[in-house]
Amino acid sequence: MGYIMVKEIFLDEQYTDAEMYNRLNTEVDVDEIHTIIREDTDCYNIHGELLFRFRKKKLPSGEIDDYYDAIYSFTNSNPSCNRGTANGDKIKSIHTNKKVYSSIMGYYDKFSPKLKYFFTKMKVKPLIGLLECRFTREYPEKMLKAIPLLKFLLFILLIIYQLIHYIVNLSILLLN
């Protein structure tokens, strides 16, 4: 079994943490993009510490296609200003946040500010804090098409979690 060669790049900081903080709620200009990664690549900082690995074609393509077909038109036609700081805003506010093309799918576990206000005004305490999102409610058949990729990603996250847990426990044993 041979080794697969991957491209290696080394990145230096372009901005300090303070400069990055001041850039919150701003967009990246095209002339600020210095590198576009299109192939399997390992990325390191200037000290040789691994920052991330980029690998192509690791997710199941059929499930990616089904997911894309299921959610793209909805997400692209329903921008949201209720995504907290997902758009780079420093302050979470549905009144001032810029709209982003990012939607909640499936269910979410917190009530919107509008629903919280309604419950308070009506003096009602909901029995459960789990709500079906708009996409799931309006397009249940599309949600079912998206689930296989989400299950795959959850499986990968669980493996990563177990590896981290194992490494932490092993480190604790070795340090004692």
Image (cartoon, rainbow, N blue to C red):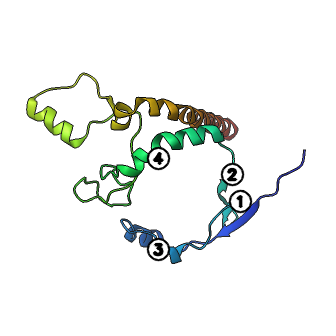
Screen quadrant of the C terminus: top right
Q: Which mark is residue 56?
A: 2
Secondary structure type for disc 4? helix
Q: Which mark is residue 123?
A: none
Cβ atoms at labels 1 and 2 below 8 Å apart: yes
Tell me the residue that label 4 is attached to.
72
Q: Amino acid at mark 2?
A: Lys
Determine the residue located farthest toward the right in the rendered image: 1
Q: Earlier in the sequence, mark 2 or mark 4?
A: 2
Q: Amino acid at mark 3?
A: Asp
Determine the residue located farthest toward the top in the rendered image: 127
Q: Amino acid at mark 1?
A: Glu
Q: Is residue 126 left or right of residue 40?
A: left
Q: Position of residue 38 (x, y in %)?
A: 67, 61
Tell me the residue that label 3 is attached to.
29
Q: Amino acid at mark 4?
A: Tyr
Cβ atoms at labels 3 and 4 below 8 Å apart: no
